[in-house]
Image (cartoon, grey):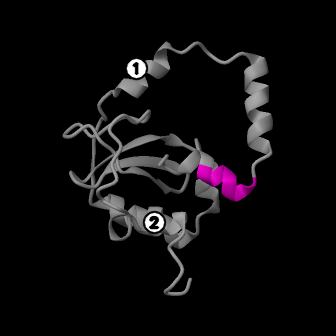
Amino acid sequence: MSQLDPPSHFEIMARGNEMADKTSKEFNSYWGGCPECGGTHGCHSVGPEHWYVCHDHKVKWCIGENLFSCWRHMSEEEHRLNEKMLSDYLEVKPICTQAMKEARKAPPLTVEEQKFNRMVLDTLSDSDFWNFVCSKPQ
């Protein structure tokens, strides 16, 4: 990457505090929120583990493993940088957000809906899939 190129999404996620816009915080995440403020700065992967974080309060919560394939496209260095950053964060239980409550009310997808979703996802390029699954909506 030259000095003129913007950082990649992987670099922003891997470097966490150093590069991420600390003011960009979501307060109604499907994946829960910080018990202190209710917000999240997004997801950081360490190997197959996915951790949501609040940089302001230095807390993290694991949402699971291998839920998003983006971790497979990250370098070992990016995983190490995330692991180093997260080592200073306190593991907490996230608060339940309105988005989480609404998702629980939704009926499960039918087999046909699941097949259609898979077909759509399979048509995405790697970069489009990364943007669709792992980036935060603007």
Rendering coords of residue 52 (x, y %): 39, 46
Name the side, left or right, on which 2 lies relative to 72: left
Residue that label 2 marks: 12
Residue that label 1 marks: 101
Identify which amino acid the numbered label 1 is placed on.
Lys
Name the side, left or right, on which 57 lies relative to 50: left
- When the figure is inspected, residue 82 is found, relative to residue 30, above or below; the finding is below
Rendering coords of residue 111 (x, y %): 76, 18
Q: Residue at x 50, y 64 (%)?
A: 79
Name the side, left or right, on which 117 lies relative to 57: right
Does the stretch in magenta take in 65? no
- N-terminal label among 1 and 2: 2
- Magenta segment, which residues? 125-131
Along the line of sight, the residue nearer the viewer: 12 or 76: 12
Does the stretch in magenta take in 128? yes
Q: Secondary structure at mark 1?
A: helix
Q: Residue furthest front?
A: 138
* Label 1 CA crowd tier, 10 Å (few <14, some 14–19, many 20+): few
Residue 15 placement: quadrant:
bottom left
Q: Residue at x 38, y 69 (%)?
A: 19
Along the line of sight, the residue nearer the viewer: 20 or 83: 20
Cα separation between marks 1 and 2: 29 Å
Rendering coords of residue 87 (x, y %): 32, 60
Residue 37 placement: quadrant:
top left
Rendering coords of residue 16 (x, y %): 38, 63
